[in-house]
Image (cartoon, grey):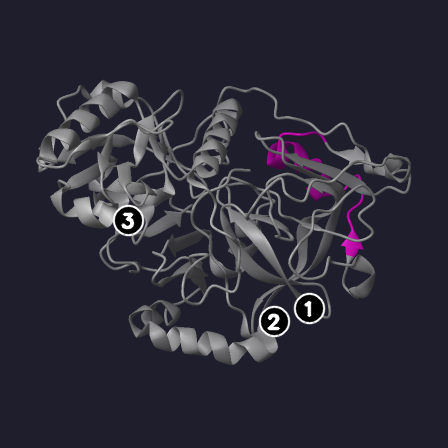
């Protein structure tokens, strides 16, 4: 789990009831985005947590915490690619009645990644969950919370209240698939219920019972027998969310389970704080998108592509092609892009040279190319920067993609040196439509996905 700067909420009229009218008014505020809802597939609204229509009210995350959590996520991704075992929970839900653990509700001041409203159970009830392209198994906090549940927005899911809830058995296919989905072995209770353990590089975790129930995503759009974890011990950087859903490349991910109905593809646009974006599940043509090959890494569930060049002011950085290294992860849960040291040094020098007349500021944590003034003020002096990928796909970065505010008086280049694998973070993806066509092993980018 890692914490990042952006959040989103998916609007479901079936689940929101009285809130439906409010979300219709949000659509009316942004008529330019409505065409995204008219194509094939499943289309859901996307919000910045502090955006005009965000239903999830949380305090801003201090920038120092944002960078710390971002670094924890990067370390977790690196550990997965180097084969290091993730942190494991010492807890066993079978013995939970005899364990009393302290719970620190202030461990996280807000939810990380992106949040969505999903419906679960019959009758369906709405829950806010973290959505992550780097995770596979979905899970939600469940009663009776035999070890601990963190405070969440809204009620905790009660399996006994759902007519369609079923616990998975120890010999079921989904139980046998937990090792590849969570990098942890499965377990089994004396009553033949499958146990899962999802653990993350920053120490966050969920342990509980693997289950099936009806997932509801929109009016008339439901998935019976959806596989997820019913968490009995959930601790870490999940804020007030009810759990997590994964969009990674694994047969237990939400994407893979929706693929037979909608197609094995999805796309999103991460919005600014002044607008809305969207998540679309299902294969559909994206006008103006340029594609690059999707690669596999040691952890086949992660999405990777090849960065071949970075241009500043229309000129490629003066580094060898080999300096960019191998496949680069693209991740919705990392804020600051990490690039190989030689490439970063060349980018830093080129951007600083182009920012003539802008005073330099001291570095901040992992960010060492900083300037005095806000991004809104100094962004006008920022050069045109383009990230070019194998096959010609590109991200033509605007100042808001290139720079990030530390505070009202300092802004920094939103890139850092990679200490391992290179990563395309979400700051650089913002406002682009990013397409993951898993069926065709392609990743695409189109400008102007949202504002």
In what quadrant of the picture does the N terminus appear? top right
Left or right: residue 402 compared with residue 442: left
For the point 59% across and 40% down, which residue is it? Answer: 237
In what quadrant of the picture does the C terminus appear? bottom left
For the point 28% across and 49% down, which residue is it? Answer: 445
Q: Secondary structure at mark 1?
A: loop
Whether tag 2 and tag 1 are in contact, CB under 8 A, the answer is: yes
Upstream in the sequence, badge 3 or badge 1? 1
Q: For mark 2, what is the residue?
A: 15
Left or right: residue 384 compared with residue 73: left
Residue 311 horizontal/vertical position (percent): 15, 34
Which residue occupies the foreground of this view, 216 or 71?
71
Judge whether 41 appears above or below 325 on screen: below
Q: For mark 1, what is the residue?
A: 124
Upstream in the sequence, badge 2 or badge 1? 2
Numbered badge on residue 301: none
Upstream in the sequence, badge 3 or badge 2? 2
Q: CA distance from mark 2 to mark 1?
A: 7 Å
């Amino acid at each position: 789990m890692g914490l990042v700067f952006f959040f989103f909420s998916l609007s479901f009229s079936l689940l929101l009831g009285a809130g439906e009218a409010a979300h219709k008014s949000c659509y009316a505020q942004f008529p330019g985005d409505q065409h995204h809802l008219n194509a094939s597939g499943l289309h859901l609204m996307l919000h910045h947590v502090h955006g005009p229509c965000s239903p999830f009210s949380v305090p801003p995350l201090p920038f120092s915490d944002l960078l710390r959590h971002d670094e924890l996520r990067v370390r977790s991704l690196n550990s997965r690619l180097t084969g290091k075992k993730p942190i494991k929970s010492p807890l066993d839900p079978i013995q939970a009645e005899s364990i009393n653990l302290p719970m620190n509700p202030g461990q996280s001041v807000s939810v990380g990644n992106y949040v969505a409203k999903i419906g679960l159970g019959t009758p369906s009830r709405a829950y806010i969950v973290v959505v992550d392209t780097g995770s596979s198994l979905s899970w939600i906090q469940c009663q009776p919370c035999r070890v601990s549940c963190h405070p969440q927005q809204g009620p905790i899911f009660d399996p006994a209240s759902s007519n369609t809830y079923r616990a998975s058995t120890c010999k079921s296919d989904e139980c046998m698939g937990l090792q590849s989905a969570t990098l942890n072995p499965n377990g089994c209770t004396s009553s033949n219920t499958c146990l899962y353990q999802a653990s993350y590089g920053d120490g966050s975790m969920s342990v509980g019972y693997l289950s099936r129930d009806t997932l509801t995503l929109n009016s008339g759009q439901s998935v019976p027998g959806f596989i997820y974890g019913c968490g009995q011990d959930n601790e870490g950087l999940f804020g007030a969310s009810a759990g997590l859903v994964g969009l990674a490349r694994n047969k237990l991910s939400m994407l893979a389970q929706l693929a037979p109905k909608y197609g094995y593809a999805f796309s999103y646009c991460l919005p600014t704080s002044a607008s809305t974006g969207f998540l679309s599940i299902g294969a559909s043509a994206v006008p103006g998108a340029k594609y690059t090959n999707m690669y596999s890494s040691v952890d086949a569930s992660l999405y990777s592509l090849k960065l071949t060049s970075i241009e500043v002011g229309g000129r490629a950085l003066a580094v060898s092609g080999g300096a960019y290294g191998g496949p680069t992860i693209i991740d919705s849960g990392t804020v600051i892009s990490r690039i190989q040291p030689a490439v970063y040094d060349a980018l830093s020098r080129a951007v600083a040279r182009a920012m003539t007349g802008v005073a330099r500021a001291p570095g901040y944590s992992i960010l060492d190319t900083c300037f005095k003034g806000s991004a809104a003020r100094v962004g006008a002096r920022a050069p045109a920067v383009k990230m070019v990928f194998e096959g010609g796909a590109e991200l033509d970065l605007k100042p808001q993609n290139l720079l990030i505010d530390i505070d009202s008086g300092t802004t920094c280049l939103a890139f850092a040196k990679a200490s391992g694998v290179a990563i395309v973070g979400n700051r650089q993806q913002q406002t682009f439509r990013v397409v993951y066509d898993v069926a065709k092993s392609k990743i695409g980018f189109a400008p102007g996905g949202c504002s």
